[in-house]
Amino acid sequence: MRRTDRVRAFLAVAVCAALAGCGIRPTGIISAGDQPLAQAHAATITVYLVRGGRLVPVTRPGLPGEPHLAIQQLNVPPTRSELAMGLRTDVHDELDAYSVEDVSSPVGRPAQLVVRPSGEPAGEKTWSRTAKAQIACTAQVIPGIRRVNLWSTVNPTKNRWELLTCDQFADLLD
């Protein structure tokens, strides 16, 4: 690079730097109000547990974006305070849950919740009556859910399921 090219390049950089600062005046700190403060509260969920063969509703903390968390909580062991109240669960398997709605109906049908054991269980699953009641009543507390489609077999050759509502277990409600 020749000397004149270097001088031209230097002058071009100096002119650009001088023009970049034109019209900008120094300012102090601009107040934008109070500092941000996170105050979100997780919604609670209702889970039905068992005491003396009867269903008892219990609230637990929920998680945003997890509408079916209550169903997944059914196999979680009771907390210390729940144990102190004599509560237990009859659902001992991890559960998968998703809701479906009949979109072909012009007036819409209430959604049903499909619940099945997680993973690929072998053979058939036999649910106790109180476990079915826990699943049905916990599901119906979820907004928009009216019934449960409980799968007892997840098998490519033979699927077995039954439709449940909490009303079927009214005799178990506390």
Image: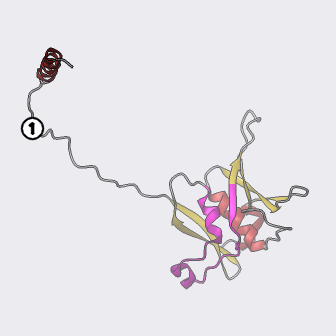
The image position of residue 139, as x and y in percent, is 67, 59
**Residue labelled with disc 1:** 28
Asked if one can make out residue 23 in the rendered structure from this viewpoint, the answer is no
158 relative to 29 in the view: left or right? right
- Residue at coordinates 49% horizontally, 58% vertically from top-left? 43
- Image coords of residue 174 (percent x, y): 65, 74
Q: Is residue 125 above or below residue 38?
A: below
Q: How many marks?
A: 1
Circle 1 — which element? Answer: loop
Q: Amino acid at mark 1?
A: Gly
Is residue 94 shown in magenta?
yes
Q: Establish if 95 lies above or below 78.
A: above
Quarter of the picture holding the N terminus: top left
Give whichever of 54, 96 is nearer the camera: 96
Q: Residues within 10 Å of mark 1 (few under 14, many from 20)?
A: few
Q: Which residues are magenta?
A: 68-97
Residue 94 vertical placement versus 17 (above, below): below
Is 75 included in the stretch rendered in magenta? yes
Q: Give whichever of 39, 22 is nearer the camera.
A: 22
| Quarter of the view holding residue 123 | bottom right
